[in-house]
Amino acid sequence: MASLLIELFGVIEHLGSGNTGAAEAACRRIVADLPQQASALHQQGRDLFQSGRFAQGCELLRQAVACHPEVIGFHKTLAEALEMQGRRMEAQAVRADMPAVRPFQSQLSPILELLQSGRLAEAELICRRVLDSLPFHCRAYGLNELGCEAVRGERLVQGVAFLKQAVAFHPQITKFHENLAIALDLQGQKLEAQAVRTALTSAPNFTTTARMMSDLGSWGKASGYEIREIAP
């Protein structure tokens, strides 16, 4: 099943095409499944921490927060774990982020009400506000996945638009550039695709960026996102 973040991007896509039924169904899936994989990460991290494996436990708790930053309980557990290790400044920083976090359920309820009354523009506005509250890396991975799915479904214009947004949000991820170049090639925009590849390989930090990819790929899979190419 697609990640909840991808579902939220999908809601906006459905709203843009006027497909109220599909948008409402996607919203209901988000509410029903939240927070799926993150809950497993959170539980496993807490178990590890309580058994004395502090570093491994905190790492999984951080992944749960990164996967679904809107779940306040994940922040609280991580802050408590850090405090028990004497890392009070880090714990305080985690708690400082919590007041701005709102649960998905509380934000999606009005979206469902607006959809059911046919007020699509207002529903889309709230969806975009929810996305704006998420960290850039979350939005970037979501846009990349949505763009890849659109291209695989031969919706090239939409796919290119999503992939361009992913690159804009997180330009240091080489895979986003590669996916965009592939999509542009498929669209027949050979010169633009070549320009994307040339800019990437000639960038001063290309080597550093490429070296980061294995770590980012591991984080992405643990957080419910898969960094992958469009082409098989």
Image (tube, grey):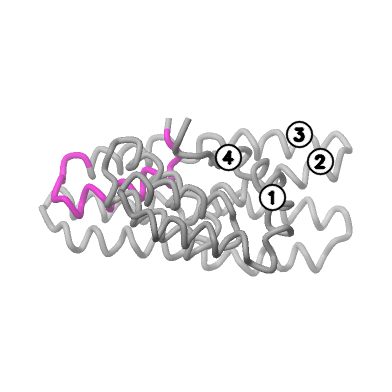
Which residue is rendered at x = 73% and y = 59% of the image?
208
- Magenta range is 2-22
Q: Mark 4 points at which residue?
A: 38
Q: Mark 2 points at which residue?
A: 56
Mark 2 / mark 3, whichever is N-terminal = 3
Mark pair 1, 3: CA separation: 14 Å
Residue 71 % position (x, y): 53, 51
- Nearer the observer: mark 1 or 3; the answer is 1
Q: Name the residue under label 3.
A: 47
Give the amino acid at mark 4. Answer: Ala
Mark 4 / mark 3, whichever is N-terminal = 4
Residue 185 % position (x, y): 38, 48
Q: Quadrant of residue 37?
A: top right
Q: Say which element carries label 2.
A: helix
> Camera-side residue: 206 or 3?
206
Mark 2 / mark 1, whichever is N-terminal = 2
